[in-house]
Image (tube, grey):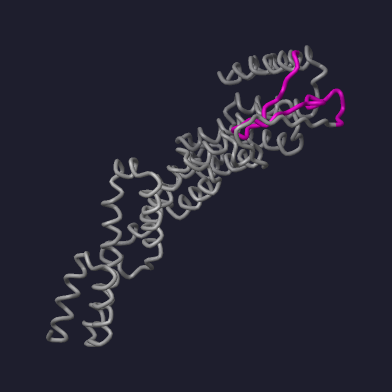
Amino acid sequence: MLKYENTLIYLFVAFVISPFSASAANTWRLEENQNWDLVATDSQKKFLAAISDAQKIADKGKTKAAEKAFAAVNKNFSEFSGKDLNLFIKAEKLFSQHKFTKSARQYDKLLTKYQDSILRNMAINRQYEIGMAFLDGRKKTVLGMIRIAGNSESISILEKMTDHAGFDSQIAIKASIAIAKNYEKREKFDEAYLKWYEIYSLGKKDSVINRDALLGMAQAKHAIYNKNPESKKSFYDASCLRSARSYYEMFRTNYPDYAEQAEVGKIIEEITEQLAYKELSVGLYYQKMNNKQSANLYFDMVITTWPESKSAEIAKNMLKKNTGS
């Protein structure tokens, strides 16, 4: 999506569509926050208001009443009737019946087939609403009776919604942040890191979004290493630690005040100790195997690379023991 700064850009697109379609001859504009908003005529505003009123009935789970309300809309605003409106009404009926997964599929179908529909934003908002409901703990039913967590379903719905809304749109960013936090909550730190990285890649410099994404990346990388059993951590790859340390250093440089509140300095010290101990553990292994030459190389590396660490003190003592000096 094209990005524009410090100004409101209006983009007018004319579509050749049946005059009976709800998506006929719509004009959209790109706001500063990268959201596409319909520049509605008076008749379109009245139509959308009537749709919104019918949606409120669907929200209450009153399916028959909602069907009547949507039928009235279809009748009173026949100029907006079309396949996109039919799909929307079908989705709303399923929504009112709490068949959220099926409902989301209909919204997705509408957004895929009728990208210029006047109902576009309403469908996107419904997808967001459904995805967030599952993400917040609503469970879905399978085989008519088994209730399971809807995390995977919610992420799929929100990812599709993001594709339709545009990744750097405000609603898509909100969804992506929610997904990243959900991954963190379930200790899926690799996935959380990738999602935070996607958000950070938007390049919204000096923004809260950019700040939180950078911190999320650092925390996820550190958590990947810390998730390993305490007694075996030093045997695992340290690339996550090095990445975490680099991200935390960047965070401290770019956001010093917030870094102080988050005690990033202490976290960097912790990571430094972990990196030093990992190298020390290799030296201790060679020491145990009576390979003092290799052990001394690692002890010297710890002392040189991490001179202020606790591991450096241990390395000095081991080196002194082995060399006698």
Q: Position of residue 124 (x, y in %)?
A: 63, 32
Residue 305 located left or right of residue 153: left
Splitting the image into 4 quarters, where does residue 172 fall?
Answer: top right
Instruction: Give the residues drawn in magenta, as a range.
Output: 16-42
Q: Residue at x 16, y 85 (%)?
A: 322
Q: Assign the N terminus to one quadrant of the image.
A: top right
Q: Position of residue 23 (x, y in %)?
A: 78, 27
Give the dominant element type of the magenta stretch: helix, strand or loop.
Answer: loop
Q: Residue at x 38, y 68 (%)?
A: 237
Q: Position of residue 120 (x, y in %)?
A: 69, 30
Residue 248 located left or right of residue 149: left
* Picture layout, residue 120 above or below residue 41: below
The answer to which of 138 and 255 lies nearer the viewer is 255
Q: Residue at x 59, y 17 (%)?
A: 56
The answer to which of 57 and 41 lies nearer the viewer is 41
The answer to which of 66 and 8 lies nearer the viewer is 8
Q: Magenta stretch: residue 34 in it?
A: yes
* Picture layout, residue 112 above or below residue 237: above
Residue 306 located left or right of residue 149: left
Q: Magenta stretch: residue 18 in it?
A: yes
Q: Position of residue 150 (x, y in %)?
A: 50, 40
